[in-house]
Amino acid sequence: MRRIILLAAVLLLTHQAQAQIKIGVVASATGPSSVIGISQMNTAALLPKTMGGLDVQYIALDDASDPNQTVQIFKKLISDEHVDAIIGPSGAPNAVGVIRFAAESHTPMLAPVGTTAVVLPMDDVRRWIFKTTQNDLLIADALVGHMKAHGVKTIGVIAANDPFGQGWVKTLAGLTDKAGIKTVGVEYFQRTDTSVVAQSLKLVAANPDAILVAAAGGPTVLPHTTLIDQGYRGQIYQTHGAATPDFLRLGGRKVEGAVLAASLMLVMDEVPDSVPSRKVAADYIAAYKQRYGTSPATFGANVYDGGLLLSAAVPIALKSGQPGTPAFREALRDALEQAKELVGPQGVYTMSPADHSGFDERGRVLITVRGGAWHLLP
């Protein structure tokens, strides 16, 4: 009898070990995208320790901002670690380059990136990808609304020559055309460029009422400050890709007056308590500060949201299969698609088969830079 009991205990422990959920986290903690990736990597330590009553093992890896390393890491997480889901990577080019590996292995991927190319157009590949940032269209709509309200008739664009910047050029053009705003110039630059004087001079010469900088992370600063140095005095807009402390620190007085639409996390003190995301954002920021002694960039919340979405989906998926199995991953994908009114620090998610981002207008606020700090626009 004792032997039978011991054997049963061993089998139970084995089952529990097998049932442990494994989640990969891929972030650019070093390299050019580290301004985005550091807070994302740090946030991995704040993700839920249990989901659906099971322990969660996180395998957090740095891709050094290199899309080739991202591919290698994804293959390792899928083939060697047999993860149930992956949160990451940080950069748009990195994410676009690995969505097919997530789809081929039927591994849900929660992409904390700006570009909509990871979830649109929806197809058999993108059905495995969920996006934990606001879609470009949602942010662009708010910016174009501000332009119309302030009499902007012409606009220029300087964009990073990557999926994020290219996607923004297309998205903005569709909205500005409808709004009767004429685009008088579009210039591109590489994320690693140390000068954008030539592009800036062309845009300044076109003399648009406003200019949009379409980039993410550190590369948002150089075009903005260069335009000011070249004498541009019109309104400069930024996307949510500029929502970093480094934008304020590196841009200094030259980014005063910038307008962007982004997460309410940037202006927490000015957001009313009635906003659903305020408490979740405050709790996340407090936990991050306690652990690291500083506030997170909003990009960290993209990874945090991935944890919240998975935590809500896992109990549903466990009804169909055990972690580590194709049945569980398939059920997890289906459950993520069913998220309804899930409150995160940046907004409220409602997913559907056609919408794998899920944010509505509650996922954005209009913000300006004044006195070296972010402030809510009325």
Image (tube, grey):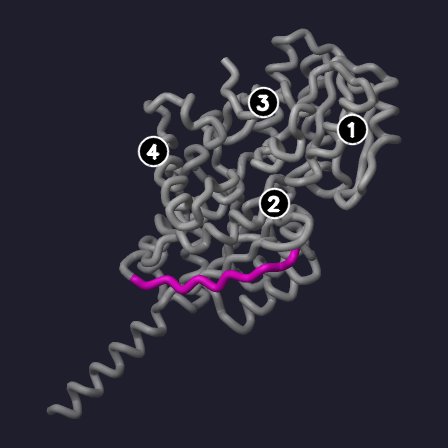
- In terms of sequence position, does the residue under pointer 1 or pointer 2 come before the other? 2
Secondary structure mainly formed by the magenta segment: strand
Q: Amino acid at mark 1?
A: Thr
**Which mark identifies residue 35?**
2
Whether the magenta-drawn stretch holds residue 35 is answered as: no
Q: Could you tell me residue 72's position as x and y percent?
A: 64, 66
- In terms of sequence position, does the residue under pointer 4 or pointer 3 come before the other? 4
- For the residues marked 1 and 3, what is the alpha-carbon distance in whole angstroms? 17 Å
Residue located at (73% from left, 24% from top): 173
Magenta-drawn segment: 54-64
- Relative placement, left or right, of 180 versus 244 is right
**Which mark identifies residue 369?**
3
Residue located at (61% from left, 45% from top): 35
Q: Could you tell me residue 351's position as x and y percent?
A: 45, 39
Mark 3 lies on a secondary structure that is strand
User: Quarter-wise, where is residue 135 in the image?
Assistant: top right
Contact? badges 4 and 2 (CB < 8 Å): no
Of residues 314 and 232, the one drawn nearer to the viewer in this rendering: 232
In the picture, which quadrant includes the N terminus? Answer: bottom left
Instruction: Decide: is 50 above or below 203.
Output: below
